[in-house]
Amino acid sequence: MSLRANNYYKATSLDDAYQKLKDNPKNAIIAGGLWMKKTGLSYETLIDLSELHLNEIKVNKDEIHVGALVTLRDFETNPEIKKLNGGATSFGVSEVVGPAFRNTATIGGSIFGRFPFSDVIASLLPLDVTVKLYPEQSYSLEEFLNIKGKVDGILTEIVIKKEEGKGYFHKVKATSLDFAMVNISISKRNNKHYIAVGSRPLVASLARKAMIEADKGDFKEAARLAAEELSYLDSNNISKAYRQDLVKVYVLRGLEEVNK
Amino acid sequence: MKKFKVVNNKTHSVCGQAEMMGRAVYTQDYEVPGSLVLKMLRSPHAFARIKKIDTSKAEALNGVKCVLTYKNVPHVAFSRAGQGAPQPSPIDKFILDEYVRFIGDEVACVAAINEQIAEDALKLIEVEYEVLEPVLDYKTAYKSKNVIHPEEGISQAFEMGFRPKDNVAASYEMEVGDVEKELAKCDVVIEHAAETQAQAHAMLEPHTCNARLDEHNRLVIYSSTQTPFHVRRIMAQTLGMPLSQIRIVKPRVGGGFGGKQQFHGEMFVALVTLRTGLPSSMIYTREEVFASSYTRHPMYISMKIGADKDGTIRAIDCHALSDTGAYGEHALTVFMIVGSKVLPLYNKVKAVRFGGRVLYTNHVPAGAYRGYGAIQGNYVLESAIDMLAEKLHMDPVELRKKNSMKEKETSPIFEIMGEGTKGTAMIMESCKLPYCIDRGAELIGWKEKYPRKQVGPHKVRSVGCAIAMQGSGIPFSDMGSCAITLQDGGFYMVRCGATDIGQGSDTLISQIVAEELMTTVDKVIIYSSDTDLAPFDVGAYASSTTYISGNAAWKTAIKMRERLISEAATMLEVKEKDIIFDGKTFKAGNKEISLFDLSNKLIYSAPQHQVAVTESYIGHVSPPPFMAAYAEVEVDTETGEYEVLDYVSVVDCGTTINPMLAKGQVEGGITQGFGMASTEEVIYNSKGQLLTNSFLYYHVPTCKTIKHLTTEFADSYEPTGPFGAKSVGEIGIDTPPAVLCNAIYNAVGVRINSLPITPEKILKAMKEKEGK
Amino acid sequence: MKLQFFLNGTDVVWDVRPDEYLSNALRRHGIFSIRVGCDESICGSCTVLVDEKPVLSCSVLAITVNGKHVTTVEGIQEEVARLSHFFGEEGANQCSYCGSGMAIIIHALKKEYKNPTDEQIRDFMVGNICRCTGYHSQFKAIKAYLAEGK
């Protein structure tokens, strides 16, 4: 089925966009617009935020502010992002399909969708990331992922805390155009380990017990815990057990890497 | 090696540039602007009977011009397989039917003035189904109480074991010698069985066709088809039209691989345009390409191989079951190739047996797919050969060399088995397989690398190998023809039926003609695959293009050269035998005339006639191309993941008419075959719905899949082929499943007996082995 | 809806539906280099440049390119002719349905990197599926094309 929408509306302010969104349950925000037609839904009005300067990356001393409409490609090639987490965050996002896809997909769309397979979410989750919404709301990325039901508001930006650290990202995939079978993302900073596992095939989560064990220096046990403490499911092409096996292997390899 | 000027030399694809530069070349580009858009209502059930269908609301929708259901289309059974006559596939499909037999099967077709209205109209069609219990496992389909084709009016053109009441589309049995007796005498017997999946062609251009009536009200269809002449014939029969009223044009095709040998939307655009008088167009969505066109036949194949202690293979026993899905396109022919293009590789056996059944299920229909039958058979046979080598404590390369086909040898199978019918005896006039095996082993570094090397704490590198053969067209069946006219200005117009679907047939036919006429490719203007303007050719399938169509072109060019010499002799008033023609000038003693002058005089002065020749070629043998393939893989022993570091192919396809395009055929085939071997998983749910119906879920190889390909050709000359050539379109795809399976076994000691060979299966098998 | 943009440098005004994708609008206006292979944001054969960045035209709403510059293969003909010469040299064009999209991605690659590594070339090519060639010949052709004049 082709995409259906009766109107297109260019919002003049965030409030304007939000009001329009509230007008009709069949109105929707366009982020990158990828896969909208795959949903098979019909829309009344598509709301475009492109006039609202949400496609900028701003850096100050402590933080990187990434607008919701920043494309994955602009994100991953940004010099500040490249420095982040030893390059692992940029690398993780660069694992999404090809450059033309990433020139269209946006940070906001990727996070707002809370997709289970998301390499973007997994890449960011071990970092200190704040998700900002309009009307004024602020969540840690982890909190945002855990919001039950529909999120009310428009994602405007994410704020990433700049910290020195080492990182690791690994996506297990059949081919480069595949969704992750699992994705493992690790950050080590200030002697603390942050371990996120996504595509289980549930949205990425932090493996908290594993993180504690990793801080103690028992990486093998941390890897075992990461495979145990989170929930894993069978999906069409991959079993729960294999996902857990992969997590055990790659969490260990990741921890060894960030502790080299 | 013989020396050629055009053939066997680098020549760019004659159409590659226009295609890349975005010119209007593919079927969709020829759609009449404003054409009616066709959309298909497809079955949500794997098996059902339509109890009631009401299209009145859809028809009443503004902009809808036509709705087709089984009630208003001709009820004539036909085969969509796109083969010659008599058709070697069951005649078991109606344009639209009261029964729907897989999720995605055609229920009703809407034609509207645009896509949105057509889609809206689909939602307005009311259908009441009697849902029937589907058959979703071909291994238990035989004589199931659920009969997929209970209807009247279906048939077989000749006896092929078609027993629809038993869910059997076709069956076949053959035996040479006494297999049981030979196996009993063998020192070593290997038993092996494995299963293959319903690979998707995944050609980039979706199935596309469009229709219009010309100024004489003839039906003109542009279609991305591999078989324009078969489409015309079968359409005329099914719609009850004279052949003369149909013209099928095949523009550039964006990939076929067998998937476009069969009918897709042609019947529907034809009916809509005939009924409305308006041009119409149908383009499959990607989901329809996956779930409503055709797949490779999944098969379960078991083998017994018996050998003496010294490694002489004495007997092969092969039994297969094949899943043809809801309809029987290519059911018999694909099945027979499991035997006929695989088992003759080991031709020194005293006895060989092959047989089994092709079963209907309520899955997406299977059809032609590059390497059909051969890739399935090769995977199982070549795995079993490695198992035999291990049991005999022999190097698998040595075992293959000892037992495989050599030049001037034959196999009794050639005479017994053809494609659907009896075969044709033949001697291998060209077979450089022993060279291919040796050279491939050298290129991969077999001696140093076999079987494995630990290269890291959890990384192992290993090598694997397999050999393969194919054919070059179907003897006494595949016919190609060509017509050449000399044009004023001294260039040639070549018209041929050979169907270029991206493999480059237009290019290599231009080369063949240019070589024979001692000219250059730019003096040869080629036009192909238009049933009004080109002479007959069966189309692009069965590796027939280089050998059959190529021979037709060569024969025609030879005739043209003879005609030119005769015309020049008349004009110069000398004897034909005294003329020396170098492609540009005819010389006899001190008399001469240039081709340019001759061509102009022939048209404008005397004798004022058109020099035109037409020839056809029908194969009397089907000389097989051969190859040896090797891969080096690196396996992660903790996860089962692996990557291919190099894939070496050494191929004997006789003379390569176009070395770069031949290489492209091999490498493209290897990569597609490797996709089948590794990542192209096919998943149905318990209701019979294909879940891998998108590039998001069906994983074809990317540019990162295989790190390196090494491809070489053996110095070989096939005396019956055009300038010594054999066909090369399919051979490349045959080996990857077996090569990968063997390499993984050599790395980690587990043999994966179902495709694709996924890391998960490898790890699971490793754990099971450790647990034992 | 009225859409004004620059198509291969020419200011054009088209009428598009709010839900129409750029691929459809371009083809409707005779830009045949847009080969729609999957129409679901994966295969790459419909790639075009929007403000010099490669994007999948099957996934960009036409109306969102308002005021922007869209470049298709029709706008860089000389460059694509040159690239296709190298494809010809390597036998890298078979069905070529992926060819226009590949040409656009290579244009973008060349803009971004002066001397791309093999890895960088593959990172750009990876979103463009080719089912015919096995990629090896394409990769060699692209390398030769990029090396030209260096």
Image (cartoon, rainbow, N blue to C red):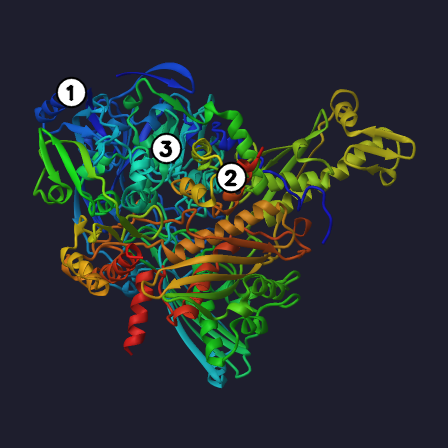
Residues tagged 2 and 3 counted as in contact (Cβ below 8 A): no
Subunit under mark 3: B
Determine if residue A159 is in view. Answer: yes
Q: Helix, strand, or loop for circle 1?
A: loop
- Which quarter of the image is occupied by the N terminus of chain B? bottom right
Q: Which amino acid does label 1 sit on?
A: Ser
Q: In the depicted view, which residue is nearer to us: A65 or A31?
A: A65
The residue under label 3 is B269
- Looking at the rendered image, the disc whose residue lies closer to the viewer, 2 or 1, is 1
Q: Helix, strand, or loop for circle 2?
A: helix
Q: Where is residue B505 in the image (x, y as percent from the top left)?
A: 57, 42
Q: In this view, does A10 lie above or below A191?
A: above
Q: How crowded is mark 2: few (under 14 residues within 10 Å), some or many (20 or more)?
A: many
Q: How crowded is mark 1: few (under 14 residues within 10 Å), some or many (20 or more)?
A: few
- The CA span between labels 2 and 3 is 40 Å
Q: Position of residue B642 (x, y in %)?
A: 39, 60
Work out which residue is located at the far right of the displayed protein and give it. Answer: B590
The residue under label 1 is A13
Q: In the depicted view, which residue is nearer to us: B638 or A40?
A: B638
Q: Where is residue A10 in the image (x, y as percent from the top left)?
A: 20, 20
Q: Is residue A135 left or right of residue B657?
A: left
User: Do tags 2 and 3 sit on the same chain?
Assistant: no
The residue under label 2 is C142
Q: Residue at x 37, y 71 (%)?
A: B750
